[in-house]
Every structure is written in C-alpha cells, then in structure tokens.
Image (tube, coloured by chain):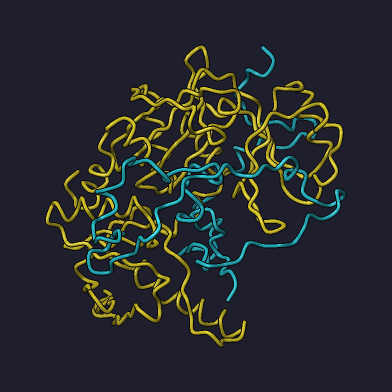
Amino acid sequence: MRGQQFVTNVLPRRGRSPIPEAASRAPSLSAALASASEQFGLGRPPGLPVASAGPSSREIRPWGLRRLVRPVATVPLPAGLRYDPVRQVLVDGSGNRFVDVRGDASAESVSDVDGDEGRSEDWRYDFAPDDPGVA
Amino acid sequence: MTVLVLAPERDLSADRMVAELDARGVAVFRVDTAWFPSRLTLEARLVEGRWVGLLATPERMVGLEVIRSVWYRTPSTFRFPEGLNPAEWQHAFLEAKFGIGGVLGGLNALWVNHPNRAAAAYKPVQLAAAARCGLHVPDTLITNTPEAVHGFVTVHGAGRVVTKMLGANHIEERGARQVAFTRVLTTEDAADLRGIRTTAHQLQQWVPKSHEVRVVVIGERQFGFAIHAGSKEALIDFRADYPSLRYERTDVPPAVAASITRLMASLGLAFGALDFVVTPTGRWVFLECNPGGQYDRLEARTGVPLTAALADLLTGAAS
C-alpha cells in the first residue's frame, strides 16, 4: 500500500549504499558527533532579549520555516515565586514549597513551543548546547 | 551518598525530585551552573586518579567523592562578571565548561543522562540506531535538494509526507517566538521549494495513526502511556493542542520493549522519553527519543509514580 512501507533507504536512483549500513559503521555515537565543547551542554542564559531581526528573502529563508505559528500562551507561573537556596525548591510568598501548593501538578510542564522537552522559558534542553548565547 | 541535581532554578520536575529525595532522607545537592562563578565555587584535586574536593554555594557544599549520581536537567549557562569583552567571555565560558564539565563528567557516578551523550540528540542517529535495534521507523529523507524532495513526494504521494524539525522547533523573530509544528506537506508546499538548498530539511512519510505512545524509560524500567489526540491538529503533532489530549497507561509489547532496551544501550542513555505512532493495525513505529523528555504531565494525569522511579534509579534503590 502506498505510504505503508517502513524502510529507510530513499535514494535508489543514485545507486549508493543504504544510509543505515553506513551509519552502522560509526564506532561511537558520541565520539562521532559530539564535539568536545558540546559535551556539557548548558541551557540558554536567562534574561536574553527575544531576537528582533525579521525574515530573510524567500529565496534563501529555510524552507522549513514556512508557516510558522505563534505559540499558544501557557498559564504563567504565579508571581512572587522565588528559589529558596536552602530548601532547593521554588517557594511562594509564604515560604511554602510550590510543588506542594500548586493545583495542577502538570501545569507548565509542557508547551507548544518545545513541548516534548518542556516549557522553553523554564526548560531549555533544545537550546543549542554549544551556543554560549550573548555575554 | 548524595544525589547531585544540575537544573535551572525554575524546574518543577527538579523541585519534585528534591522533595522526593528529602522525604527519603537522601542528601541532595541542587545546582544551577548559572550560579558560577558568583555563587558557585569548585575546588577539585586529582588524587590517585579520582577527583576529590568541594562544590559549594553560600548555603551548601558537597564533597565530590560522595556524589553517587547526577541528574542532568540542562542547567543554565554560566554568568560571568559584567564588563568582559566577547573574547574574554568566550574564554571564560570554555574554561568553565571544560573545567566544571570535565571534573563532574569524570566522577565515578551514575549520570541520568551523561552530558557526553549529546549525540543522542541527533534524530538521524536515533532513527538509524532504532532501525538497527529492530524498531520500525518511518521512511525518512534529510536533504537540501529540491530533486530529492520531489522524488520523496512522488514515492509517497501528496498529503502523505510530513515535515519535521531536526532540532529546536522554534525560532525568535521580530521580537516574538514562533513555532514550527510537524505538518503535512501540501501540493502547494512542494511546488515552491525555494529555501530548501539553504540548509538540511527532514521529511518523513506520514504514518497512519491510531494514537501515539510515549514510553518513559527509567533505567531498566519502561512505562508506556497512550496519548489520544482530540483534534485534527493534535493528531498530526500532539504539541499543537495539549488540552485535547487524553492519556492512559498502556503496555509495551515485549518485542518493542526489547528493542527499546537495545536502543537505550546503543545511545548510552539511562533515561529517555520515546515517542511512537501506533498504526490502526497495531504496529508501533518509532519517531524519536527525547533524552530530556518531560514526564510531569504523564505522572499527573495517570498517577504513575515516575518521579519515584527516577529517585529509585538515582539512589540505587532500583538495582
């Protein structure tokens, strides 16, 4: 049936070796792909301004960036939360652990920005690991 | 024994883990690397082949030699004194990264996950490894040529190909954040491929979908969660419409579970959130593995104690 095959080789016209065979020769995934400076990936530094540059011309703008959408707003964390360095958790204005008092334990744990890795403002797994950001 | 948690200050999963470890009476030391150097100090000496010394904040300190495990939640980038020029900043950044990252990475501790496993974030690596481990994977094309895109669409047919980001699915532009969800390629999309040559693009066949499954792997344990989409948008990319989603526990077929175990070993991961499509005929098709995948919502919606399972792994209670 059309579209029902589950194979990885899609370049038969070139007559080259299937990609999986070549990949299987990689001795070590990390050694092959993670540069030295990538090996302790850190998140985006807090407080960076949102970039203001506009899109480039349609001729060179990456095709994958067509049809971008604005993320759906998520409910922000309540105001007044602070990190308690002694208790090592966020606490509210009364000093209660936030994880004990918030109503919906799943709130803010996901978003449409980078949903599978968490809310971008709080979890920055997807930030380029070797990009130090702006000083 | 101490569990070291490397996480940003605003990380509710880390908060929950600290609470869990506190309740167990396990010592936990939580650090955000953004505190370095102003609020975080490191003194490490190499003694008989082991790093010993202290990692300290104004409120707490931990001996490197008592760290049993490290939970790596992508802590924030170091914050250096104002006034460094860009070259000085970059120098300080790399020295800190190699110094702190090197010492911590060299500890004889269990890492969840080890930061040197950056390659696991490469989705093409994951797909190839998954296929070698016996998982079904979608037909996938990564290219920067229009010809290859046309060929792929011809094979699968219009409306049966999706485009997906290989890295972050969002960018910042004009002062706002914008998102690129997985989406089905239209005839109009394929007719105008300007910009394809600019960079690599990923296209995959559209896999007929009954529902999706996220398998959360914690050490040797696997927890399957069916994710049922309640809207057209969520059916294509569940991140597009979280409110419509419904979650339930589901068993992982033994053959799939065995392949997942091999894949995790291949990628060197102790934790992962793996996404699958389950077709109407019941076939599980691997999409990707998120080495830092979130699980809070799954735990909250289903009651499965994932935080406790992670704590078991970090403290050795799982072995």
Task: Tell me residue B117's x, y (percent).
Answer: 45, 55
In the image, is B259 to the left or to the right of A6?
A: left
Whether residue B319 is visible, yes or no, is: no
Q: Which chain is cyan?
A: A
Residue B312 vs residue A54, the one in the foreground: A54
> Which residue lies at the image location 50% right of the left edge and 66% below the top edge?
A46
Up the image or down, A2 lies above or below A6; here it is above
Up the image or down, B16 lies above or below B2; here it is above
Whether residue B202 is visible, yes or no, is: yes
Residue B254 lies in quadrant: top left
> Which residue lies at the image location 65% right of the left edge and 42% below the top edge?
B180
Task: Tell me residue B49's x, y (percent).
Answer: 27, 75
In the image, is B200 to the left or to the right of A131?
A: right
In the image, is A97 to the left or to the right of B251?
A: left
In the image, is B218 to the left or to the right of B284?
A: left
Residue B80 vs residue A49, the one in the foreground: A49
Task: Tell me residue B245's x, y (percent).
Answer: 46, 27
Task: Tell me residue B307's x, y (percent).
Answer: 27, 44
Residue B71 lies in quadrant: bottom left
Q: Which chain is yellow?
A: B
Could you tell me which quadrant the C terminus of chain B lies in? Answer: top left
Residue B4 vs residue A20, the one in the foreground: B4
Q: Count how many numbered circles sit on residues in the image.
A: 0
Residue A50 lies in quadrant: bottom right
